[in-house]
Image: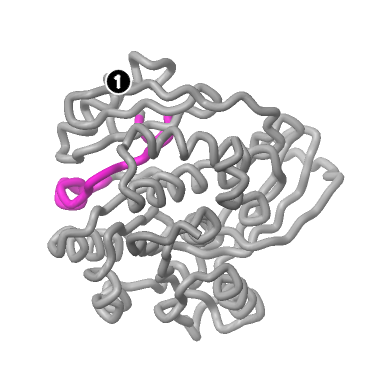
Amino acid sequence: MYRENKIVVIGSTNTDMVIKVDHLPNPGETILGDHFIMNQGGKGANQAVAIARLGGDVTFICKVGNDMFGNKAIEMFRKEGIETTYAGIADQEPSGMALINVDKKGENTIVVASGANNALTPQDIENAKSVIVGGDILLMQLEIPIETVEFAAKMANKHGAKVILNPAPARSLSNDLLGNLYMIIPNETEAEIFSGVKVVDWESAKAAADIISEKGVEIVIITLGSRGALVKERENYYEVPASKVNALDTTAAGDTFCAAVCVAIAEGKTVLDAVKFANKSASVTVTRIGAQTSLPYRNEIDCL
């Protein structure tokens, strides 16, 4: 394995209920699906599992309900080699759930009931301070309370960890949070929300990255789906094309990308090489159905 520096993930964990459909339903439309899958998901959990499979040394900080779904999630994390000391239980909340439709083109719609994810508080982060300040990279998303994200970012940055944010689902971010980030990884839609620039090609992605970086973030990586990713590292720009594959399901592709970037950075790779590695990793994910069931292992990437 390639375990180098420690990575901490703080985020959500859900049980995904996935239905394959011919097309995504319109409002008020009922359609019949042809395949059902239930597996583990949630952006935080997806990223933690992907990091472990790609060879990273990862601790996952989360909250689950005191129910069969939460118990199964914790059991699965441990089987993946993830440190779960700070995977807590919220007795008064159910575990998070997600309902996902995936069409024949691999596009999806997702509805999430956050449940216990909303019970992850700054006090939980304070309780886990030793592992956060002892880590090299902190990766977060926005499926947990924003005050928890802000608290953790400030704590980690103060103690020298590289704070990486995947700002999904998109929402407004404070300058205080942005100022504590080393890297932000939005997709096209999220980049447009943060910058006001509609991202449709490389040039508009560069314009959006400029505006986002002016808010105090050192490195901006905008993922562009099948086109690849635009990287702005201080004054330098890189256009990194995506690998060409037959996409079956885009669920968790962005999570794989973020995880792979963290693993590569932890191994001492440059940002550009980290993004190339992340593109390869995500290209494997989209050829499979599901969230965590689709996440690749390191040996699969190294042979590409």
Q: Which quadrant would residue 247 be assigned to in this image?
A: top right
Q: Secondary structure at mark 1?
A: helix
Local crowd size for mark 1, using a 10 Å CA cut-off: few (<14), some (14–19), many (≥20): many
Q: What colouring does the structure picture have? A: one colour
Is residue 286 in sight in this rendering? Answer: yes
Report x, y in % for residue 286. Answer: 64, 38
- Horizontal side of 302 relative to 106 (left or right) equals left
Q: Residue at x 62, y 81 (%)?
A: 67
Residue 190: within the magenta?
Answer: yes
Q: Amino acid at mark 1?
A: Lys
Residue drawn at (29%, 44%) of the image: 172
Question: Which residue is pictured at 51% across the width and 78% down the height?
Answer: 93
Image spot of residue 228 (x, y percent) = 48, 26
Residue 44 or residue 67, whichever sits in front: 44
| Image position of 106 (left or right of 11) | right
Q: Please tell me whether residue 254 is drawn above or below residue 56 in the rendered image.
A: above
Q: Is residue 193 above or below residue 253?
A: above
Does residue 277 appear left or right of residue 71 in this picture?
left
| The C terminus, quarter of image | top right
Magenta stretch: residue 195 in it? no
Looking at the rendering, the stretch of residues picked out in magenta corresponds to 173-191
